[in-house]
Image: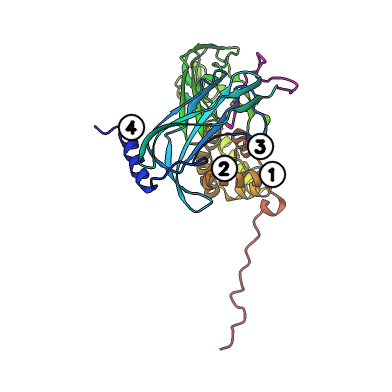
Amino acid sequence: MVTARTILSTLLILLAFAVPARAVEPGDLTLTVTPDLPNGAHPYAREMVLLRLRGVYRTQVLLEEVRQPALVNFSWTQLGRDHWGRTRMPDGQMALEFERTIAVFPQHTGTFTIDPFIHRLTINDNGERKQIDVRSEPIPFPVAAWTGPSGGPDAAEPWWLPARDVAITDSWDPDPETLNLGDTARRIVTLEAQGMLAEGLPPRPVMRTRGIITFAGPVKRETIITPSGPVARATYQWDIKKGVSEVIPLDAIKIPWFDTLTRTLREAEIPARQIGGGLADREEDLKATGPASWPALAAATLAAFGLGLALIGFRTGPGRLRFDRGQARRLRLAAASGDAAAVRAILARAAQAQPELTALWQAEPDLAHDLAALDRRVFGPAATAERQLDLPDLARRLSQPRRPGPAAALAPEPRLAPLDGPVAQA
């Protein structure tokens, strides 16, 4: 069985033949460790810093082993495998290049020192096999104290969450608006933070309001290693039982976090939802109705006739245009779950069914700007994704009724050329 160590040894032997055997001179073996600090700022406690190791060796390397310092005041994880390649030196000669990336997380405020890394190499020194240790320089590592008016790494509340980006997804089974008295739904919220380990994510939020009984489930945590840093993921779960017949509003839960790229405090949100109200909540509303009497049928017929006349007047007059209830509910659900592609698909169908309504959206500058941002988020490259687009707020504004302008209230009367008009001469 071929192991990773066997492959690495074979690669080093092949690379060794690419570098001619020669006597090792000062400067031929260098190892540097560089902290990757965002905007050059000192990190706060528990904030990720990438350490980039780079070795340049102008000799044949037969075996190698990296000896890492203790990193007593840090948590850490290696990002991927080591990289070996070739690089051209300033004098035009070729050399071996070694690279490794480590994510470190200082645990406390203060000034620390990262001790030297040691790369133990077995080299070919002018035909002689020799073992040599290449050391990096010690690195001063100051960790800044928090100076904000509230929060920070040492505060008990709110939870300190330094990350490059935070995303929340919210799912229910079944939809909470369909719950009747005594029904139960399962809510699953997934929190992802880029540039963190799973152990740094907050505990399960408290979900409590009048009229529901909540059973908290287990919390699942995992760390996903990517080349740009770890991604921490926590999955929170609740079983929620409706205990009253009324509609229950469930408030949003805000999760503050520190944006390590912009060095600002921000907020992520578990969206507000409504429990009940989508279907009849009372059993008597679901009972079959008895046969109607002839007077009742006659009255209903007259009422329907009058309603038809009213609707004709509404359509031809300056009425309000809006989503139907089914479309609006699907739009809110897609927005609450953070599914931008589903939101865009619903709006595309609305554009075909209700072009007058979509024209009114485009006539509002703020709304047109957010719709363009939605298109960039769905169809643009990842680098241009709109992180600050508030999908639930966009869905709320799109669901509001709108009154068409004077030009859209009545269609212009078509004009036909007279049947006995002049005939063009040949």
The reply to whether the C-beta atoms of the residues labelled 4 and 3 are less than 8 Å apart is no
Sequence order check: which comes first, mark 3 or mark 2? 3
For the stretch drawn in magenta, the main secondary structure is loop
Residue wearing tag 3: 39
At x 70%, y 50%, the residue is 405
Residue wearing tag 1: 366
The reply to whether the C-beta atoms of the residues labelled 1 and 4 are less than 8 Å apart is no
At x 62%, y 34%, the residue is 37
Sequence order check: which comes first, mark 2 or mark 4? 4
Graded by Cα atoms within 10 Å as few (under 14), some (14 to 19) or many (20 or more), the crowding at tag 4 reads: few
| Secondary structure at numbered mark 3 | helix
The label nearer to you, 1 versus 3, is 3
As rendered, which of 154 and 30 lies closer to the eye?
A: 30
The label nearer to you, 2 versus 1, is 2
Residue wearing tag 4: 5
At x 44%, y 21%, the residue is 288
